[in-house]
Image: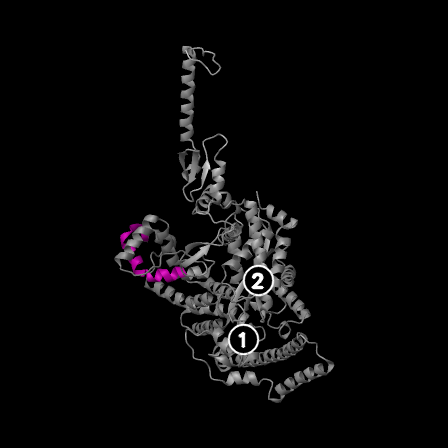
Amino acid sequence: MTTNVGGVPDQPQSEHETDQVSQNQKKEQGAKRKRMKERSEVWEHFDKEDLPSGMQAICKYCGMSYKCGAKKNGSSVLWAHITRCRKYPFNTPKDSKQSLLSFKSAKEPSGGTSGLTYHKFDAGSIRKALSFMVIVDELPFKFVEGIGFRHFCGVIEPRFNVPSRITVAKDCFETYLTEKRKMKNVLKRCNSRVSLTTDTWTSIQQINYMCLTVHFIDNNWKLHKRILNFCPISSHKGDDIGKEIEKCLLDWGLENVMYITVDNASSNDTAIGYMRRKISGWKTGVLKGRFLHMRCVAHIVNLVVSDGLKTVNESVQHVRHVVRFIKQSPARLQRFKKCVLDEKINTKKGLCLDVPTRWNSTYLMLNAAIELQDAFERYSGEDPHYVVDLNERDGKGSPDSDDWNNVRRLSEFLQAFYDLTLHVYGSLYVSLNLFFHELVSVAVLMKDLVSSDDVDMCLMACRMKEKYEKYWGDPEKINLLIFIVVVLDPRYKLDYVEWMITEIYDPIVASKLVDNVKVALNALYEEYRVSSGNDVNREEVSSSKDGKTPLSPKHKKIEVLKIKYKKHKCERDGDAKIELDKYLEEDTAEDIDEFDILSWWKFNCSRFPTVGRIARDVLAVPVSTVASESAFSTGGRVLDQFRSSLTPRVVEGLVCAQNWLRASPFPSIEECLEEVELLEEDLKNMAVGDDDIDEVLEIID
């Protein structure tokens, strides 16, 4: 028995009370062990020590200590410390100016090399990069809500809060608005005229879209192409297309249009007529829009060759049958590949079956089959069904030597058109001057085949020549720009063009065509010379207005007299066409494969300023609409069956922004601070406007 402090003896504990105390202690110990097992992850960053002052949690990085163990000392204080600990390696404090060093990847999109760089955590920059990825890689907006992507972002940067698909959609639209403003500044600073290509397309939504692409040479003599608009139109009628082109040009502030390249649809003739009237009203056309209409060369070549292949001989049918027979069965194809190896045919070309309505596929089929001729002959001896099946189809069997000779001549003939098509399909290099040489080679080849003893080839060449002369045979209808651009090529000039015209045309047609080229060239030079003088006058007057001190009436008269004297000096020094004559009489440049016509004019435009301005505008003219047609492939991927709810404005933003972001950057474009501030204000007003947000939200299912 014990005595308490007050002298009152304690009562002895019963066995039941003792058992209850021991059970409570066991429960506390079990709960303690359970808490130890389920302890917070924050203890991975802290060490627990039992000090005289009590239990302490000590940071593993900076040594800071905190009380722990009591109920009021939870883990929230420890987590708060980790987020601001200066020595925690994954923290970049906001008040710290020090950045983290890292190695830049060797495969940069901009073409840069690897090296040491620095970075700071910036959620805004990461969101811009995310919108860049979604646009360029044609990803759906819901991609950012995928489990895998969120896990990836959590591993690579835990501090970044992955936005929702609605936020990403708005970021992508804001990127489009930003790039559009940059594009407007580029076009505003460009001193040259622009050329356009346009085409129409019907999407999976059954909405008619029109793509308008601009081609121009910048102040640094670099050729560029950019999609301006990918917008819906009410119909494919010519007037509707023309009005939509006018609307787009007014939105971009473009009036100095040199040429518009379209395909051979009759509605495009109406659209060009509409635009010719509008541009004449703007008083910005060249020779009253005389050369505004440029027909797509690729479409004309397709019409010419397709018309000629309607009379294709039986030899092509025989080759098509043997190719189809082998490709119908995987076992036959494997046996044929073994025959190729046994014959030791060193080629990477494989069998391909053509589409009869596409002449280029017929050429590729014949070109590949000719190189595999020996393999076909070997295969006929190894497969007993080969000859039997072919006899049932055409009653002849496998192609004989005459058939192979016929398709070889046809393949060589079609190769000229195929090479022409490949050259004119280019949109990132000057193609108009290359087209003339291909046109000459094709014309000479058809001229020879018309008088050939081969009846089949002669008949085909006659049909093709008839279609050829419909577009390029009439001196009054042909676009003379295809000849003028060769005159502006310092390797050839006017004498070369005259000689080539006499070689491919009849004497009467050639004489008329040469005269038309000379007249058009002189008229074009005269118009540019006069407009150049007006530009000089405007520059002089504007420079006097831009002075810090306003000019007095006396000084204004002196400035006007100076301008008149400069004009008088230009007229007194000789003929108005002396610069053009000087260029034409100068020796031609060396004709080498690596010749860069834009670089030549860049370094010689100071010697021939007026002719250089003509060259800069003319060399940017595309000869095909492939630049606009290729955008429809992008549109088809953006508007697939899983994303058919996209609105036309969002589709335009995605297609245009992808084209601008993928293209090479413009050289050294300097923007003043006022324009940057104006851009930021526009983005704030436009990107978060109610109309734009509602339209972006419509894309969410």
Mark 1 or 2: the one toward you: 2
Tell me which amino acid carries mark 2.
Met
Q: Amino acid at mark 1?
A: Ala
> Left or right: where does residue 351 sit relative to residue 131?
left
Q: Which residue is mark 1?
A: 615
Label 1 crowding class (10 Å Cα cut-off): few <14, some 14-19, many 20+?
many
505, 391: nearer the viewer: 505
Could you tell me what secondary structure mostly forms the magenta stretch?
helix
Quadrant, the C terminus: top right
- The quarter in which the N terminus is drawn is top left
Left or right: where 633 falls relative to 696: left
Q: Looking at the picture, how far across and down is residue 690, in whole percent?
A: 65, 48
- The quadrant in which residue 351 appears is bottom left
Position of 396 with respect to 451 (left or right) is left
- At a point 46% along the width and 59% down the height, the residue shown is 358
Disc sitting over residue 183 in the figure: 2
